[in-house]
Amino acid sequence: MYDKLTENDVKRIEEEIENRKLVVRKEALEKLKEARAQGDLSENFEYYAAKREKNKNESRIRYLERMLRTASVVKDNTVEGVVGLDNTVTVYFPDDDETETYKLVTSVRADSLANLITIESPLGKALLGHKEGDRISVSVGNGVEYDVVIRKIEMTADEGKEEIRKF
């Protein structure tokens, strides 16, 4: 899998794991005990719902732990005026005569609906390391390409507002 994570991503994942183990797990076990105490388990919907929530939490913990084990930590070595991780970039698409603004983030925080694109996406890879005014060709595979022009680069700190993607 080898997700690319920043040190901040790793910290937030570790905090989520700790919260799920210490808080959410206890709550789920308590709900499961209460539902089990209600009697006949074959027709007890609350028992099955509590069991499902407990299993969902355990699954999320395993997923996050596996992500940490297999991830590579990336450093933000960006320089002002050059596109890098956690920069907000305004891009012009000449073919469509449209302008879009994106923030480049790690794969666990990507959300295309919120214009948070991963540095591993075709557009993210193409933008990295370029400057304002550069015209870049973005390859999306199978010989399909399109051009973009970088209009503006804003240095934005990793504020940690984006959530870690839930699967």
Image (spheres, rainbow, N blue to C red):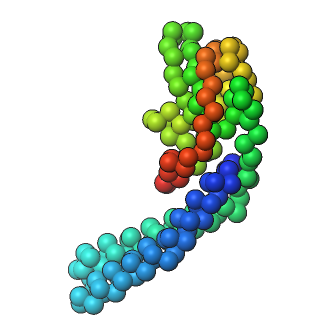
Q: Position of residue 3 (x, y in %)?
A: 67, 50
Q: Residue at x 53, y 25 (%)?
A: 101
Question: Left or right: 47 with respect to 156?
Answer: left
Q: Position of residue 155 (x, y in %)?
A: 63, 33
Q: Residue at x 64, y 18 (%)?
A: 150
Question: Left or right: 79 with respect to 91?
Answer: right
Front position in the image: 60 or 99: 99
Is any part of residue 146 visible from this angle?
A: no
Question: Left or right: 78 with respect to 88?
Answer: right
Image position of 63 with respect to 80: above or below: below
Front position in the image: 100 or 34: 100
Q: Position of residue 10 (x, y in %)?
A: 64, 58
Q: Position of residue 62 (x, y in %)?
A: 57, 68
Question: Left or right: 122 with respect to 61?
Answer: right
* Picture quadrant of residue 156: top right
Is any part of residue 39 visible from this angle?
A: yes
Front position in the image: 125 or 51: 125
Image position of 97 with respect to 12: above or below: above
* Picture quadrant of residue 138: top right
Image position of 136 with respect to 30: above or below: above
Q: Residue at x 66, y 61 (%)?
A: 68
Q: Residue at x 28, y 83 (%)?
A: 35
Q: How many marks?
A: 0
